[in-house]
Image (cartoon, rainbow, N blue to C red):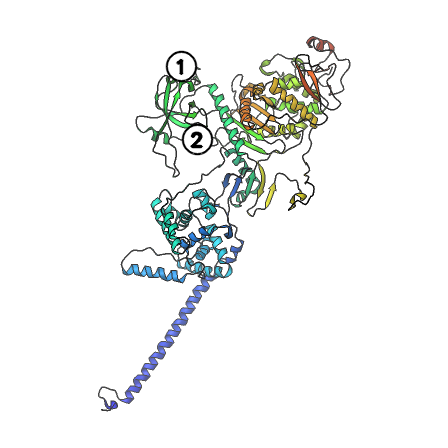
Amino acid sequence: MRAANHPLRPPPRKRKRRRSVLLSFLGYGFGAAVVLFIAASAGAGYVLWKVSKDLPDYESLSKYEPPVMTRIHAHDGSLISEYARERRIFVPINTIPKQVIAAFLSAEDSRFYQHGGLDFQGIARAVYKLVEAKVQGKVRRVEGASTITQQVAKNFLLSNERSMERKLKEAILAIRIERAYSKDKILELYLNEIYLGIGAYGVAAASLSYFNKELKDLTIEEVAYLAALPKAPNNYHPFRKTQAALIRRNWIIGQMEKNGYVTSKQAEAAKAKPLGVQLRKLGAHVFAAEYFAEEVRRQIYKEYGENKLYGGGLSVRTTLDPRLQRIARNALMGGLAQFDRRKGWRGPVSKIDVSGDWGKGLIDMKSPDDISPWRLGVVLTADAKKAVVGLKPTKEQDGKHVDTREAVEIAFEEVKWAKSAKTKKVPKAVTDVLSPGDVIYVAPKDPEDISGVWSLMQIPEVGGGIIAMDPHTGRVLAVVGGFSFHISQFDRAMQARRQPGSSFKPIVYATAIENGYKPTSIVLDAPIEIEQGPGQDIWRPENYEKEKAGGPSTLRIGIEKSRNQMTVRLAQDLGMPMITEYAKRFGIYDDLLPVLSMSLGAGETTLLRIATAYCMLANGGRQVRATLIDRIQDRWGRTVWRHDQRVCENCKAEEWTGQDEPQIFDDRQQIIDPHTAYQMTSILEGVVQYGTGRSLKKLGRPLAGKTGTTNEEKDAWFVGYSPDLVVGVFVGYDTPRPMGKGQTGGRVAAPVFGSFMKKALADEPAAPFRIPPGIKLVRINHRTGLRASADQPDTIIEAFKPGGGPDDAYSVIGMSDVQEAGSVLNDAYQPAPQRPTFGSGRGGLW
């Protein structure tokens, strides 16, 4: 049968018509598809155009300067403190260890060096797993497919908003960033920007914060843990989410092995180790350096502003000597506690129930965290001879307190100091002072031996400060501004303005010696009346404790015995305007009121200023300016400030080729004659040997200094020095009030100075003070100041300027006539045949 005549086949005319309809339909369908494609493309193009129109400028990444924390270092390079809103240390990519890079690539973007900004394989894998989960009816979190480049785009240029528009912008920016920057640059931006928890931004800061290590010192398991943190730091907290952190860390170690960065053996060993997190402490990192660090912070804030301080990445090299800082802190704490003991026992801090877990009761009580080795404790049992004290549990790294309980014994010998502050009753048994439940402070008698004898302590009410300086440069080597920075941030060494009392007298006497007086010049020490003007009472200055006037005395005796009346006479003869000028030269006051009471130290100043003035006596009369900072560098390592402004061009030679050693000139201004400075040093040595500071004589080394005590013993000072170290000490209540009869600078402040010097100079040989050329050393009678022979009693060696020497006879400043002089002079004195040529004569010279 012919196919054309098949009964089921349509006639030829009908077949042609049907084929025509089919072709027409296909033509229309293709056209519609083209139109739809063009429309979709146009729509997509419009969306991309609209999204791209508002894109931030990715070229700003080339000028990226992240906020970097300011770091403050001691003079030996050890870290003191850090200041930042975001704790970040910027590190170039070429200094980041390969192992760190490997861990982050394995965790976040293993194909980083293969893709062009978008990882299509990763996207396909994420979509497949999502669809698979839906088919299986599982609830699955969408797997992230963002590349490191996308994360850079989001972190630097976009917000954290969850929207399709933001994802589109992120993708477009990622492609553009890849075209504009190298892979290493993109990775550098990422590793320095990411937040890794506990306030740490970037891998370098995180390395220090979590492990207290530099990047180069991290192990495989440590870098893997850091790489676990970008997704959600709180989900992998080392203490609160330890198990989750271990699982995530070990998965990353497995990825590192899979990608060929570590061997199977290394991976297994790393997985077997604990997290090993050692959180770095915040605050001052050098023991007891809080006051020093805070003063440096204030200075940087004042000079450079808040943004530079907290985000400018400054590197500050300070003058702090950590060893001297520890010694200063212990000396001041010990001195303040010793003084406070003399005032009596004020009673326990509180009282708690000790029938149950007394440790929990102590944990609930706040106590300063910077008074180690002091510990808060509670009396568990007490009898006549001893008390058992349970100690407040210490904290672990996670902030929790340990479960173990510690206790120490306190013998009666370490309690018997605690006479009642109210009744002054002296205890005869431990139970006279302590009873079970009393919350108290205790401390080891020897801070280096906590297993030895423990003593009862109490937080001192009195305040104080200590400062140590290099007299040749003005560099501040140590500062302690109070008993505890935790209790009070007010710095009594740098901020407190108090009357220096007699510690100001050396400036008055230096003024006199600079202007023609000698250490042997005689000034009358006797009652004096000063008219202060119309309507004002007559001022009658008195010596300390109304001590009997010594009559005509040498300038040396006036300082050694700290005589007020003869100091006023001397100031009256010199004229207060001259003393005001020298006080300004020495930097103690900017504009001292020129009235005679100021010669006794009635004007307020700081311990820093008075100690700086003593530096100029110690260094031969050269002006120095106090500084806590040696050098400041910016984030790029460029020096932007130096304390020493001298320039040494010849110091830049790369090698020695026989040239002379570079000479650096001394640019310090000479404010007083070097001979005057040495004469004052010699007189101030006498304070230690024979005068108000003689408690320091037992140290057995050349020391010079001066005590200071204000009216009613409200302030106690001692400022002194060895040839190369100046130390100032102040003790007094923050709200000035009497410290008690006899609580003078010699009794309260000098022991703190002595305690510091004993340890600070323990390894230094006892060296004499340097004598400038031309000084004449002559033996004199210590009391009269007249020339003496070696076989005479009570003689000393006195220093005189070139061409000078002791007088063979004497003249007295402050005597109005011959008859008055004759009535008070000791038989050792002989009348002077003629009037002296120095002095103004205001006080009456004879």
Task: Pinpoint residue 398: horizontal percent, then vertical percent.
Answer: 38, 39
What's the distance in space between the residues labelled 1 and 2, CA to CA? 31 Å
Q: Nearer the viewer, mark 1 or mark 2?
A: 1
Three-letter code, disc 2: Pro
Mark 1 neighbour class, 10 Å CA radius: few under 14, some 14 to 19, many 20 or more: some
**Residue designated by label 1:** 428
Mark 1 or mark 2: name the one nearer the start of the chain: 2
Vertical placement of residue 278 versus 486, above or below: below
Q: Assign a secondary structure to mark 1.
A: loop
Vertical placement of residue 44 versus 259, above or below: below
Query: Image check: 105 left or right of 630?
Result: left
Which numbered disc covers residue 135? Answer: none
In which quadrant is the C terminus drawn? Answer: top right
Image quadrant in which you'd find residue 34: bottom left
Mark 2 neighbour class, 10 Å CA radius: few under 14, some 14 to 19, many 20 or more: some
Image quadrant in which you'd find residue 623: top right
Vertical placement of residue 563 versus 214, above or below: above
Task: Pinpoint residue 82: horizontal percent, then vertical percent.
Answer: 50, 41
Q: Assign a secondary structure to mark 2.
A: loop
Q: Residue furthest right?
A: 834
* Residue 315 makes an appearance in the image: yes
- Whether tag 1 and tag 2 are in contact, CB under 8 A, the answer is no
Vertical placement of residue 630 versus 168, above or below: above
Task: Pinpoint residue 66: horizontal percent, then vertical percent.
Answer: 51, 49
Image quadrant in which you'd find residue 19: bottom left
Query: Image check: 627 left or right of 150?
Result: right
- Judging depth in this view, the residue of 458 and 18 nearest the camera is 458
Task: Pinpoint residue 528: horizontal percent, then vertical percent.
Answer: 66, 15
**Residue designated by label 2:** 368
* Residue 588 makes an appearance in the image: no
In which quadrant is the N terminus drawn? Answer: bottom left
Three-letter code, disc 1: Lys
